Amino acid sequence: MEIITSNQNSRVKLWTSLQTAKGRQQSGSYLLDGWHLVQEALNQAAPIQAVIATEAQMDEHLADVPQGVPAFQVTDEVARHIAKTNNPQGIFAQTSLPNNSFDSKYVHAGQWLLLDRIQDPGNVGTLVRTADAAGFTGVALSVGSADPFGPKVVRAMQGSQFHLKVIKDVDLATWIDDLEENNYDVYGTTLSDTSVDYKTVVPEKSFALILGNEGQGLDPELLAKTSANLHINFLGKAESLNVAVAGGILMFALN
């Protein structure tokens, strides 16, 4: 097993670059930080290109890494450099990005969450994790949404990306057209006069739910394409809900 002690090592430079969108795109991979995420990737047979760990973490977890998966031991200083934090757990995995060429024309069953320009990484990660918990088939994110494989989103997803499909940079207008052609109900979310209380809706087995940008809401072009638009009635005086909270309520209610 190779032991790496320098931040200038070519492998370390690669792993560090995975903190950036450019680095992830060029390498076709992203970084998992912490044993919980690494373990979940191993449990789900995700395509792991390398496991990286400090001596203490390697001693504790090397036996759990399958033969054939490259393992590299790094110093505590190098681990901090890779993580860009002062107190990393000290174990990482470089993991291949999923195939992003999924064609919405072939979606014939299941439940999909569509995200229109959701920009906060914490919201995106929480929504993916909640979609997983609610039994959804997948999450499709429009251009302008937070990168689902950036470090903050990966941390918030807590491994849920291994349990359902996560597809980025999709044309949501095309997705809606294709889903409706395949007999999907597609539900938007808005507080307009034409929206209905989500409690009155009984969806078919296959449906999609669209959530819009934190500040601007759903694109009007997308709202015009939906089967119905839903709202949540408030009991108190709050004017709005965080999009991840609203999404959680709707996903569990619809599914």
Image (spheres, rainbow, N blue to C red):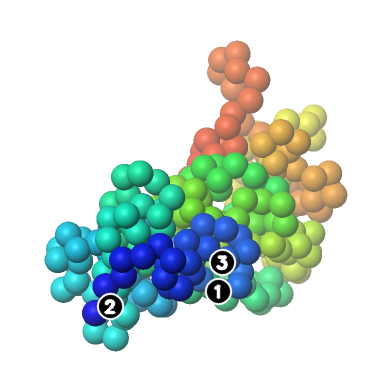
Q: Residues within 10 Å of mark 2 (few under 14, many from 20)?
A: few
- Most extreme residue toward the top is 237
Quarter of the image that includes the N terminus: bottom left
- Most extreme residue toward the bottom is 68
Q: Is residue 250 visible?
A: no
- Quarter of the image for residue 238 reads top right
State the residue position of label 3: 24
Percent coordinates x, y for residue 24 in the rendering: 56, 66
Q: Residues within 10 Å of mark 3 (few under 14, many from 20)?
A: many
Relative vertical location of residue 190 with respect to residue 54 in this rendering, above or below: above
Give the label, 3 or 2, closer to the camera: 2
Horizontal side of residue 25 vs 154, given as left or right: right
Q: Nearer the viewer, residue 118 or 133?
A: 118
Q: Residue at x 70, y 48 (%)?
A: 117
Relative vertical location of residue 49 with respect to residue 208 in this rendering, above or below: below
Percent coordinates x, y for residue 146 in the rendering: 62, 51
Percent coordinates x, y for residue 46 in the rendering: 39, 74
Q: Describe the element under mark 2 as helix, strand or loop.
A: strand
Q: Amino acid at mark 1?
A: Ser
Q: Residues within 10 Å of mark 1 (few under 14, many from 20)?
A: some
Q: Residue at x 69, y 62 (%)?
A: 169
Q: Amino acid at mark 2?
A: Glu
Marks 1/2: CA–CA distance: 21 Å
Give the label, 1 or 2, closer to the camera: 2
- Quarter of the image for residue 183 reads bottom right
State the residue position of label 1: 27
State the residue position of label 2: 2
Q: Residue at x 17, y 59 (%)?
A: 56
Q: Residue at x 27, y 61 (%)?
A: 75
